[in-house]
Image (cartoon, rainbow, N blue to C red):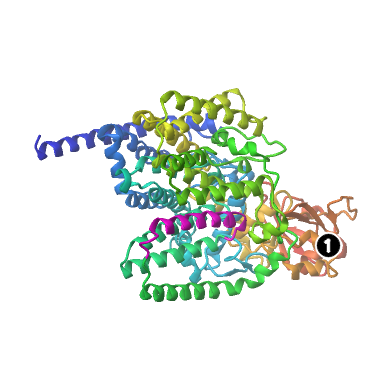
């Protein structure tokens, strides 16, 4: 067959694949409303869905389904190699498309629910998650509030004390150190709506590609067998990027950024040692320092410290890999020193304004300075991860050990299979693998800390005092996944099929029992059966000698991971649930007529306060990242109730004209402590006046209440969604 015939055949296959993809996308679009109603229980979702949502869904489904269609048309190997070759272009295309379509993973649709509307508005796939309050009540509103602050370092919209937006919360700021926070660039350059789309899509794409790249480095044994393991690495990257734990924590505490920084810096370090060109080394060194900045500015020690041990283990492995061929010149040292100085200057200049914030946080009642010694983690959770794949589709039932779906979510790491296979490889080869030994050491240390605990002095030496046992599981699982991938790529054992079946069945049984014990009220018989099937598929993905079995099992496991992971957070179109709420639009309009600071009072007042700030309304009781001690001293000059308000906290407000204070163990004067990060302020109108509050958006009928000293409230707008705007009027004014 000549080249023209081959070209014609490819063109024909491409046309057929495109047609089938379009047809499949259309069918998926047609079925989507019924699927969403059944699996995500969005009962409002259906025939009244706007045409543009159907259009977005059609585009997304067509592109996703084009991958398996092309695999059938051109073959799995050829399609896989094309995806590998153009992975960075494809990743950039996904981000660009997400920004163009204005879609994100925010659960902001919950604002419609809380304000009496339709939470399915703008939902392309999945469902808004009520539990993601740290995202749609804190993170996203904080980022949006910066649009009204010209992305300044301190934001004056948060009550009487300007809030530090750089050091505590994941908000975009025009400062040099934003060089180390590339996922904020969308906000700074494109504004809130498109910036949110960039923030969600770019982090997911970067995490998958960084995971894939570090696994390529760990599994590349071309020198020994001539093999590259693109399919294996793709499955491994899916086990990380679409893991239940990653997706349930995706928009909180910068976990994706930490992993991206660790994986990218290790890959750059590997290239740095392998490449002798001065310019190339300078670029790799700059990239490593950029990753260091990203990691440091994640600012969540409970995950950072365990992941730093993973990074250390990988660095040891990379050094051992290149040992004997490492050559560092004087020019390399000079360039590295200059880059380190520049890095230190940028970080110092950027962080100096936050020193007061850092010191204030360390001296709060919550979070304060944690002194953890570990211990108490139940080993049964090491084997129960398979069951968490079901979390997006079934309402989680809490128990005494696990309180919600976010805390239940884990990685599918197949512990301890990675350790066992790595040890089997080393015994069979009669050769120590430094990567494996270092990772096994980290797994052992972290596992002991989580389950048994260390003395306080040892925890301090190992810098683990800010780390709780359940937060250990990120680094613990990442090590297990890396071990599993490397062991599968360097396999020195060839088990027979019956042996693989026995191992798979035993592991499935252990996983089923552990999952049932871990979540007794949540996992039923049908789910247990599904867990067993998935366990067997995952085991076969790594153990099966027959290529067809291994490939089939891996594809099914990867698809399940993708569907589960992408169903945790909704695919949300537009930002209208935050920016187009009628009750807030009325408050915005009233600002020009009624000057002074606002407050939210009554039901869900701390949440509404954050929504007001997100829309540029200066609000007294918005989230206090650092307590406003100056304001609270006006209420409590002696500090007798300091333990109630000296904390990172949601500040609820309730205004009552009753002079009788209900007895409560949680009540300290006008402050009522609800939880470690939540208290309710019960002010008098005079106290509000002293604090500078002039307007209140309340669920209480304030205009019908009677207060001493001649204070009163006057209605200044309509009641919308049960909330009415009032103006505080002092006696004699």
Q: In which quarter of the image is residue 467?
A: bottom right
**Magenta highlight on residue 304:** yes
Residue at the extreme front of the image, as rendered: 430
Residue 716 visible in rendering: no
**Magenta highlight on residue 405:** no
- Describe residue 164's horizontal placement relative to residue 645 as left or right: left
Q: In this view, does 452 lie above or below 636?
A: above
User: Which range of residues does the magenta coloring cover?
Assistant: 299-326
Residue 438 visible in rendering: yes
- Describe residue 508's horizontal placement relative to residue 363 as left or right: left
Kindly state the secondary structure of the residue where label 1 is placed: loop
Q: Quadrant of residue 9?
A: top left
Q: In which quarter of the image is residue 586?
A: bottom right
The picture places residue 504, in percent across and down from the top left corner, at 49, 28
- Observer-nearest of 483 and 234: 483
The picture places residue 233, in percent across and down from the top left corner, at 40, 43
Residue denoted by label 1:
641
Prevailing SS of the magenta stretch: helix
Q: Residue at x 35, y 42 (%)?
A: 229
The picture places residue 141, in percent across and down from the top left corner, at 58, 56
**Quarter the N terminus occupies:** top left
The picture places residue 378, in percent across and down from the top left corner, at 67, 40
């Amino acid at each position: 067959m000549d080249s023209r015939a081959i070209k014609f055949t490819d063109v024909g296959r491409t046309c057929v694949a495109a047609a089938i993809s379009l047809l499949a996308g259309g069918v998926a679009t047609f079925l989507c409303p019924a699927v969403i109603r059944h699996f995500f229980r969005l009962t409002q979702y259906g025939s009244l869905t706007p045409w543009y949502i159907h259009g977005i869904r059609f585009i997304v489904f067509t592109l996703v389904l084009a991958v398996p269609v092309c695999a059938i048309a051109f073959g799995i190997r050829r399609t896989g190699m094309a995806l590998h070759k153009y992975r960075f272009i494809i990743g950039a295309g996904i981000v660009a498309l997400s920004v163009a379509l204005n879609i994100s993973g925010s659960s902001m649709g919950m604002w419609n629910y809380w304000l009496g509307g339709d939470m399915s508005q703008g939902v392309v796939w999945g469902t808004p998650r009520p539990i993601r309050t740290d995202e749609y009540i804190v993170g996203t509103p904080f980022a949006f509030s910066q649009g009204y602050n010209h992305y300044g370092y301190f934001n004056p919209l948060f009550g009487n004390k300007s809030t530090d937006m750089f050091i505590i919360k994941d908000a975009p700021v025009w400062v040099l150190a934003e060089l180390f926070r590339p996922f904020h660039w969308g906000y700074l350059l494109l504004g809130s709506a498109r910036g949110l789309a960039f923030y969600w899509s770019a982090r997911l794409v970067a995490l998958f590609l960084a995971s894939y790249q570090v696994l390529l480095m760990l599994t590349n044994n071309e020198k020994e067998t001539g093999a590259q393991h693109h399919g294996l690495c793709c499955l491994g990257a899916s086990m990380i990027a679409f893991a239940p734990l990653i997706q349930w924590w995706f928009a909180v505490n910068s976990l994706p950024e930490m992993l991206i920084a660790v994986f990218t810096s290790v890959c750059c370090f590997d290239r740095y040692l392998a490449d002798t060109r001065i310019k190339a080394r300078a670029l790799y060194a700059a990239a490593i320092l950029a990753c260091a900045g990203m990691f440091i500015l994640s600012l969540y020690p409970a995950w950072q410290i365990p992941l730093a041990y993973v990074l250390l283990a990988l660095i040891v492995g990379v050094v051992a890999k290149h040992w004997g061929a490492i050559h560092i010149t004087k020019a390399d040292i000079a360039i590295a020193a200059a880059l380190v100085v520049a890095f230190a200057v940028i970080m110092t200049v950027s962080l100096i304004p936050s020193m007061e914030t850092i010191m204030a946080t360390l001296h709060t009642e919550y979070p304060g300075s944690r002194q953890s010694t570990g211990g108490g983690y139940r080993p049964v959770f090491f084997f129960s991860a398979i069951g968490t794949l079901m979390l997006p589709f079934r309402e989680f039932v809490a128990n005494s050990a696990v309180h919600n779906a976010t805390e239940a979510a884990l990685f599918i790491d197949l512990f301890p299979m990675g350790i066992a296979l790595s040890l089997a490889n080393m015994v069979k080869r009669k050769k120590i693998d430094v990567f494996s030994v270092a990772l096994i050491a980290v797994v052992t240390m972290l596992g002991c800390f989580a389950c048994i605990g260390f003395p306080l002095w040892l925890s301090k030496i190992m810098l683990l005092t800010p780390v709780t046992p359940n937060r250990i599981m990120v680094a613990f699982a990442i090590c297990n996944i890396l071990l599993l991938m490397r062991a599968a790529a360097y396999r020195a054992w060839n088990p027979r099929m019956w042996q693989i079946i026995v191992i798979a069945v035993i592991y499935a049984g252990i996983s089923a029992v552990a999952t049932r014990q871990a979540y007794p009220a949540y996992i039923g018989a049908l789910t247990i059966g599904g867990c067993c099937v998935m366990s067997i598929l995952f085991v076969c993905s790594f153990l099966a000698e027959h290529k067809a079995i291994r490939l089939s099992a891996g594809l099914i496991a990867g698809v399940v991971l993708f569907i589960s992971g992408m169903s945790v957070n909704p695919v949300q179109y537009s930002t209208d649930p935050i920016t187009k709420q009628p009750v807030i639009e009325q408050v915005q309009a009233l600002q020009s007529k009624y000057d002074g600071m606002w407050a939210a009072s009554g039901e869900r007042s701390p949440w509404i306060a954050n929504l007001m700030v997100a829309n540029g309304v200066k609000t007294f009781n918005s989230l206090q990242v650092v307590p406003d001690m100056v304001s609270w001293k006006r209420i409590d000059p002696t500090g007798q109730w300091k333990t109630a308000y000296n904390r990172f906290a949601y500040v609820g407000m309730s205004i009552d004209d009753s002079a009788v204070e209900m007895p409560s163990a949680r009540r300290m004067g006008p402050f009522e402590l609800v939880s470690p990060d939540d208290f309710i302020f019960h002010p008098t109108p005079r106290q509000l006046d002293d604090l500078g509050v002039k307007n209140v958006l309340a669920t209480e009928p304030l205009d019908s209440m009677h207060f001493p000293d001649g204070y009163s409230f006057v209605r200044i707008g309509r009641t919308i969604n049960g909330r009415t705007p009032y103006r505080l009027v002092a006696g004699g004014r």
